[in-house]
Every structure is written in structure tokens, then in C-alpha cells.
Amino acid sequence: MTNELRTGQIVKNLVSSESVTITKIQDLGTMVSVSYTGVNSNLSSNKVISRLEFENLEVLTSEGIFNFTGDARRFTLYAEAERINSAYQFDPLFAVNCSIVDPLPHQIEAVYKYLLPQPKIRFLRIYRNTMFYLAASENGTAALVNHVKEYLACKKIRDDYGSQLEADQKDVLKKKIDDATKQVDSALVSAYSTILKYSAGKGLDAITVSQFHGDLGGQINNNVYAALRSRSASVSKPSRQTQARSPNQNRNTRVQKKQRSSLV
């Protein structure tokens, strides 16, 4: 019997919590003493079992030998879970890259460079496991496109015909480029005035930002955060019905206090 089971083999059914590696087998007549080490816990112990229990031990494999008789689906599921759990260490944008959303570069910059690094946002625990996006309206996008076209047109004139312009014309063109740059920044802020947040528990929700800053960075650091803060306060604030106490509750409280004082 001891020839069938050898030290170094990994078996199950010896302990219920995990599979174990047999380190020593000792024949005790009608009983068998088995020393083992847990595969997962790495804890060593000893157990005396009957010969029938010893014979029912199922050999999984021997230490150092691979066994490919396991459930392939479960192994694939485990490997995928470990990959997802560690993916952020190699790709900070993994959650976005593996989703069906195709964000634009400035959206990624707005969320990952300006919004999420804010300590104020990190402490808003109500937004744990929530993805944020800035969405543009149709009217805002149209205005943004027009201002970008105007900026690009002025920039092309400067690049292609700058050497042919007079000094006063260069000054006028420079002023137009500066004005167009400010208009693009303002239009960008006005266009992307809707915060989309998605969480697994509550789904998709939209928050409209009604105040605007001169540039996108200031808009996110001030007005976007303020909108999220306002929404979190309204969500986490208990209702008046919860806060209010009925007269019966107040009377019961006073009675309980009198009973405790009388006992003292």
C-alpha cells in the first residue's frame, strides 16, 4: 500500500481545506501516519488515518511534475483575473483601452492628468470605482470647430506668408492668432460642459456644469470638481424625513432617560 502512495506526491481528501504534499508515510498496523505540508498554506502537520482512508486518498500529481488534467476553463478564468488585477501596473489606461469607449486624446488628458490626480477627487469616496468622461454638446462642438478653423487659417497665413507681410500686418495677424487661441480655449470649455460618470452599481449618469473657466485646466480644477462635490453632497445628505424625530420618539427617549436615572 505504501508503494502506491509515495512521499513527494500531492494528494487531496487528506484535509478538507487544501491539497497537501506528502512528506512522510509510517505504517502503524491497522492505521497509517501521514506527514504532509499544505500546498497553499505551506503549513506542516501530521495525521493518523485508517487504511481505508489512506487508500481513498486521490493522487493529483507528484511534486515537480506538471498535471494537465485540471479544468481548463477555470484556469483560463483565474489567469484572466490575475491579468486584469495587475494590468494597471503596466497600462494606467487599461480600463479605458479594454472598454468599448473610444475617448479622444483631450478627454484622456482631462480625466487622467487634471481630474483624477486632484486630492479632492481622491477623497470623494462616493465616486470609488467610477469612470469619468467629459462629453461635448452638438452646438458647443460646432462653435469649437469654427474657432479652430479660424485659428488654423491665421496660423497658415503666418507660416506661409509671414515674410511678405508688413510690420503692422504682422502685429494684426499676431493679435488675431492670440484672440483665436483664447476663443478656442473658451469654446473647448463651453463645448465639454457635461460630466458623464459610469459605475457598475448605478450605471451611466450625467452632470451638467453651468459655470465656465477661461481654460480647460482651470475648468476641471474648479468648476468640474465643484459640480461633482455638489452632486456628492446631495446624494450623501440624509433626507429630512430621516433626520426628523416624531413626538412619540422624543417622548420615548425622555422616558428611557428617566428610567436610567431612577436605576442609578
Image (tube, rainbow, N blue to C red):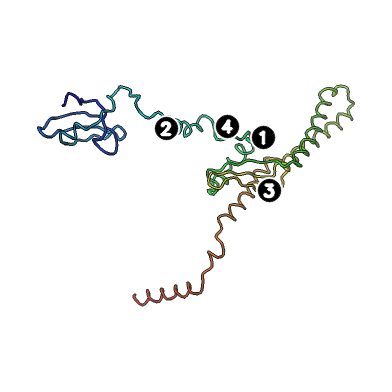
Q: Residue at x 40, y 30 (%)?
A: 75
Is tag 4's residue or tag 3's residue first in the polypeptide sequence?
A: 4
Tell me if mark 2 has few (under 14), some (14-19) or many (20+) residues whose alpha carbon lies within 10 angstroms of its own. Answer: few
Give the number of the mark in front: 4 or 1. 4
Q: Type of residue at label 3?
A: Val
Q: Which quadrant of the rendered structure holds the N terminus?
A: top left
C-alpha separation, residue under disc 4 versus residue under disc 2: 21 Å
Residue annotated with mark 4: 97
Q: Type of residue at label 2?
A: Tyr
Q: Is residue 223 above or below residue 69?
A: below
C-alpha separation, residue under disc 1 versus residue under disc 2: 35 Å
Residue annotated with mark 2: 78
Is tag 1's residue or tag 2's residue first in the polypeptide sequence?
A: 2
> Are the residues tagged 3 and 2 within 8 Å (C-beta)?
no
Give the number of the mark in front: 3 or 2. 2
Query: Taking 16 as reference, is 219 left or right?
Result: right
Residue annotated with mark 3: 209
Is tag 1's residue or tag 3's residue first in the polypeptide sequence?
A: 1
Q: Type of residue at label 4?
A: Asn
Say which element carries label 2.
helix
* x and y, in percent, of residue 5 in the image: 20, 26
